[in-house]
Amino acid sequence: MGWQPAKPRLRVLPLLASWLVSGAAVYLAAGLVPGVDLRSWGGALLVAAAIAGVAVSSIASANAAGLRVIGSARSSGEFAVAAANGSKNHARAIYLRGYGRNLSGMGVVACSRGFTSIGSKSTELSHMRSGRLYKLRMPFRGDCQVTGSLSGSGRIRLQILAA
């Protein structure tokens, strides 16, 4: 017996509490950032709901494409650097995704097919957009090892995804 999909459980009270805390954080942040004006508490809740909607849709699109996170890392600082690695048997595609500001990254994919075929390819990425998937070059489909690095400023997060 293998993995079986299950219906997700929706717990209303924790969801409502999370939404209210997120709304309070948005309202507080709007008060601290010059030039941002939220006229009411309801506006903060609306912004929090929109942010949650964007996050859910990006996760759903990655899952719909059959992508799985096989490696991740986080870092923070003025000159932040994060590195991660992962592996995927029978890989069809490998992606790198970064979150943060002033992002640039690099990915190296090494794949094998049995004992006779081994190859590697590297991909350099500059001026990356936060949250966007970047497809890494692969020598061929097979069992692959991936190493990725990401640099940026502030809080950054690196994800390696595979299909």
Image (cartoon, rainbow, N blue to C red):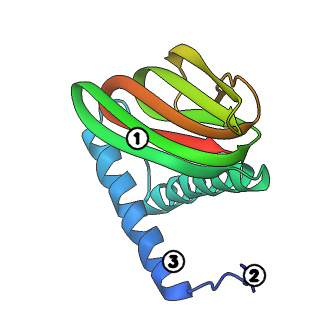
In space, the residues marked 3 and 2 are separated at their CA atoms by 25 Å
In space, the residues marked 1 and 3 are separated at their CA atoms by 26 Å
In space, the residues marked 2 and 1 are separated at their CA atoms by 47 Å
Residue occupying image coordinates x 44% and y 45%: 72
**Residue 115 locus on image (x, y percent):** 67, 36
Disc 1 residue type (three-letter): Asp
Q: Residues within 10 Å of mark 2 (few under 14, many from 20)?
A: few
Which of the marked residues, 1 or 3, is nearer the chain's N terminus? Answer: 3
Is residue 156 depicted above or below 87 in this figure? above
Is residue 112 depicted above or below 50 in this figure? above
Q: Is residue 131 visible?
A: no
Is residue 103 depicted above or below 76 in this figure? above
The one nearer the camera, 29 or 12, is 12
Residue with the mark numbered 1: 37
Disc 3 residue type (three-letter): Leu
Residue with the mark numbered 3: 15
Q: Which mark is residue 4?
A: 2
Residue occupying image coordinates x 75% and y 27%: 140
